[in-house]
Image: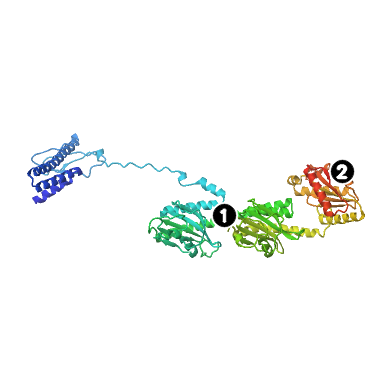
Amino acid sequence: MTGARGLKAVRSWVNALSLTEEVIVVAGVIFFFVGLATSAMLIRIGFLAASSSLIAYVVVTRARENKVGSKEYDTTSSPGDAVEETSSSSKKLVFDDFQDSRKPYKVESAKDSPNPQPLIIHMEKSPMAQPERVPHEPPYDFQVADFFESHEDEANREQGPKAEFSYLVKKVLTVIKEVNFAHTVALFWVNREKNQLVMESFVSDSEHFTTHRRRELGQDLVSQVALNGKPQMLNSLNVASRDEMLPYYDSTETVKTFVGVPIFYSRSSVTQQEPVAVLTVDCRGEDAYGSETLALLGQFTKLISALIQSYTDKYDLLLDSEVLRSITRFREQLKIDFSTHNIVRSLAEEASRLVPWDYISVVVFDESRKSWVVQHVMNRMNDPYVPIMSDVDPHQSIAGSVIQSCIPKIVDNVSGLGIPRFYQAERCDSNGSLLAVPLNSLSRCYGALVVENKDPRTYSDADVKLVQKVSESGSWALEILSLTDVANNFVSLDETTGVATRKYFLERVQEEVQRANDFGSEVSIVMLAIDSMNDHLSRYGRDAFDFVLQNVGHMIKSATRPYDVVGRFDFNRFGMLLVNTTPNEASLWAEKLRKNVASNIINVDGKSFSVTISIGVSGAPAETNDVELLENADRVLKKAVEAGGNVVRVF
């Protein structure tokens, strides 16, 4: 019993030692046993003395600390808390649990009695007895910029649905990377028509991520997911085949885990079995992902599918609005000048706003040459291309085949097709992609619109549908123009001005020039154009300008003889055939007409104004023909216009 108590006291004493004191005691014990094991007497005495000194130092130090601690405990007692000490007996100390905790504790001493009461110690609450308060962390300072990127988001909205979609996808990929502790997260589109993977966006810690946006479908991991439509997960990538399995790094990356999941999207109610995109996640750690990762990525693919749906709807609305604006601009241009040249020019300009291009050309049929010709060309690169008014081979060319079949055609690489764009001897340096759309109505093909880009595989079926919406307006305009020409062949008077039509005027010029050559008589041609036509159209409108044409036509007919011929040669030009009239006489007559027109006041919708005219006069030399006579008159009319207008020039 006594040994157990002694052992317990030793353990209690050892447990009270500090770390330094324990080290000193252990050193003393070691010195003690080393001294016992040493045979040399002097060395033994030295080790034993050192051992005794170390242990004695610890004992004395511990005794001093206990004494000081006892005194400190006595000094903490308050004057009213004195405890009566007796040498003969001890007093019982009882803690009263029923005291009011809000008041200070008191010390009461019980007297000896037959039923002695226990000594109750009431300890006054001390501030030192309270637990230390842990300082509170400063509250988080809320910043709107930490949760909302208003400026960047608004900027992307202004740039269009494509920029907004790319911005949102980038944010989603960033979240996926952070959640999965990934090395790289990327999204690839699957283009089955061109057998390609097209990179949309990526977030990566690597400096070697590929700079190539397009890549052929192959045997790599991303292509396998795109072709099979099933998730792919590898937890230990082979180092030797890593470059072949991960095509989106330009150099070797220490990636050991890969996960690829397909993204599906379909506008119909039937679920599409072929993925439209592939989401890839990789990590440098081995065996980093499992089935829970696939489940999490499945939720993200649903989110991306919803973004695709939103982007597609917005993009379709944007394209429809852009097509509507193009058609509106096209019709406005035709109101100014309804001619073949203006139709093909406006059609090419509006097509350039809808699809990427480097060259745009329009092929139509030329009645005078009885062949298909390149009527209009737009060349952004300013390098060799087909010239205007070049004849098109209708049988051995891309444009000719589209005209013959009335079916749109897409060529991903022109150099590999083996046939020319327009004709065999053409000089075109571009070997990119080509899009050809026919200009046809229900009963007839009027030509073709050809758009070309230097990059291969640029155009898709969606581009064809987009260009067709605008080309339909051009086709119907050419149809109306053709029907108008047919109707004019059976009408001798112009509906607007009341003078002869162009066809009838040219027939009469041919007859009168032939008669003048046969009988040696004089004949003269006078060409007249109203000055500043575009200014009048923009200021007063088309209806007011038609009234101006009527007014000028009436004045010309009033000034000519019954057997002279007056015709509307063009939209803004009149032609007069003066029979038995020399060039000098014709110039005097033209000068008188010019003054009358300039001094005439025209009133339209409460607006009063006057117009001026430019006139060119040409006589018929001996043995001339009608074509030369008209060309001479047209040439001097252009000189009169270049001189500032309101003048007469004689050939």
Q: How would you rate the neighbour count of disc 2 (Cα within 10 Å): few for under 14, some for 14-19, many for 20 or more?
A: few
Q: Is residue 136 above or below residue 183?
A: above
Left or right: 74, with 536 as reference point? left
Marker count (numbered): 2
Residue 427 image point, x, y percent: 66, 56
Whether residue 497 appears in this view of the structure is no
Mark 2 in CB contact with mark 1 (< 8 angstroms)? no
> Who's the residue at 46% across and 64% down the image?
230
Which of the labelled discs sits on residue 592, or is there none? 2
Of 108 and 339, which appears nearest the observer? 339
- Under mark 1, the amino acid is Lys
> Who's the residue at 56% across and 49% down the image?
159
Residue 602 image point, x, y percent: 81, 44
Q: Residue furthest toward the top? A: 79
Q: How would you rate the neighbour count of disc 1 (Cα within 10 Å): few for under 14, some for 14-19, many for 20 or more?
A: some
Residue 286 image point, x, y percent: 38, 58
The answer to which image quadrant residue 20 occupies is top left
Of 355 and 631, which appears nearest the observer? 631
The answer to which image quadrant residue 127 occupies is top left
Which of the labelled discs sits on residue 314, or is there none? 1
Of 310 and 575, which appears nearest the observer? 575
Of 256 and 250, which appears nearest the observer? 250
How far is the residue under mark 2 from the one under mark 1? 63 Å
Q: Viewer-nearest of labels 2 and 1?
A: 2
Residue 526 image point, x, y percent: 84, 49
Q: Secondary structure at mark 1?
A: helix
Q: Residue furthest toward the front? A: 425
> Who's the residue at 15% across and 39% down the image?
61
